Image (cartoon, helix red, strand yellow):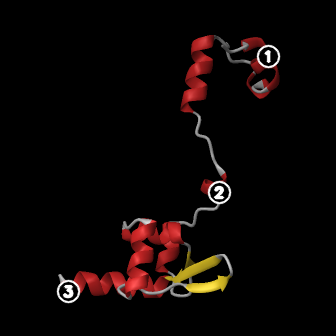
Amino acid sequence: MYDINRLSDTVFRPMRGFDWNLSSLETLVKSSTVRTASDLNRQPLQVVQLDSALLNVKTVMETTGLSRSTIHAKVKNGTMPAPIKLSARCVRWEARAIRQWIDALASTK
């Protein structure tokens, strides 16, 4: 399963004083969070509060609670603000437009 001696000598060298055994290593591995490339590229949700911010589709999805396909369907129907096309494969929504759209939905209910 795990080669404790190899891992403790190479990966966890700075933690020499720790008593390495299989259960402590499993606990450490299970409790550690793995950061992926998508985590590093994620926009903070506070960016929605900036008027000049341009939001990617993942941030719009988190802000509105809608799926990617629903967002694109609403844009196609004209019931949601259209994104700005920055390049052939890059579109962004204006944060101000998304906030105004959400406010308009809230005021009609």
Q: Residue at x 72, y 13 (%)?
A: 4
Say if 35 sits above or below 106 in the image.
Answer: above
Element carrying mark 2: helix
- Which amino acid type is marked by label 2? Leu
**Whole-number angstrom distance, CA of label 3 to CA of label 2:** 37 Å
Residue on which disc 1 sits: 6
Say if 80 sits above or below 58 in the image.
Answer: below
Q: Position of residue 95 (x, y in %)?
A: 49, 82
Whichever of labels 3 and 1 marks the residue nearer the N terminus, that label is 1
Residue on which disc 3 sits: 108
Residue 40's disc number: 2
- Which amino acid type is marked by label 3? Thr
Q: Residues within 10 Å of mark 1 (few under 14, many from 20)?
A: few
Tell me which corner region of the image, top left, top right, bottom left or bottom right, holds residue 79. bottom left
Q: Residue at x 45, y 76 (%)?
A: 72
Q: Nearer the viewer, mark 3 or mark 2?
A: 3
Whichever of labels 3 and 2 marks the residue nearer the N terminus, that label is 2
Quarter of the figure that contains the N terminus: top right
Q: Position of residue 54 (x, y in %)?
A: 57, 81
Whichever of labels 1 and 2 marks the residue nearer the N terminus, that label is 1
